[in-house]
Image: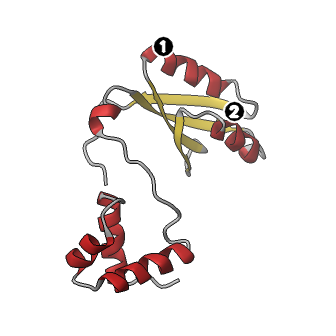
Amino acid sequence: MQVTGKDRELLALLGENARMPVATLAKKLSLSRTTVQARLERLERESVIAGYGVRLSEAYLSGLIRAHVLITIAPKALSAVTASLDAIHAVTTLHSVSGSFDLIAIVAAPSISELDQLIDEIGKIGGVERTLSSIILSTRIAR
């Protein structure tokens, strides 16, 4: 899979607005519409673009309480813990990390009490040994 400079420019534009019309993308990239369409199809076919989704506004997100939950798991429990966390829709992102914790889950809840319940739920998952959470106060940079 070879991603060119123009492909990266195209991906950056789609990151800003995945619903941008192909004609607009072509104009911004100084390419023809058919060239941009072909690039999109190739990037999708080669699984560089895995799909298109909704990016929520900061106004909406500011109404949610978000937190990082650092998780230490028991040996050989990664797949079971990951499956359990995947079933919790309030877990928006899950990262494997190095260091004293094994995973970092990004979670979102509409209130502190629901966030507290969510963190308790994560702590009760079989294979989870310890959690440490930090509430996100604000987002300074989001790309």
Q: Which mark is residue 113?
A: 1
Label 2: which residue? 128
x%, y% of residue 127?
74, 34
* Quadrant that contains the C terminus: bottom left
The vertical placement of 38 against 74, above or below, is below
Asked which secondary structure carries label 2, the reply is strand
Q: Is any atom of residue 61 visible in this view?
A: yes
Residue found at x 24% / y 71%: 24
Residue extending farthest right = 76
Name the quadrant containing residue 71.
Answer: top right
Measure the C-alpha gap from mark 1 to mark 2.
Answer: 21 Å
Name the quadrant containing residue 67.
Answer: top left
Front-most of residues 4 and 120: 4
Query: Position of 125 compared to 59: left or right?
Result: right
x%, y% of residue 31?
26, 85
Neighbours of disc 1 within 10 Å: few (<14), some (14-19), many (20+): few
Residue found at x 50% / y 17%: 114
Give the residue type that dot 1 points to. Ser
Query: Position of 59 compared to 86: left or right?
Result: left
The vertical placement of 38 against 25, above or below, is below
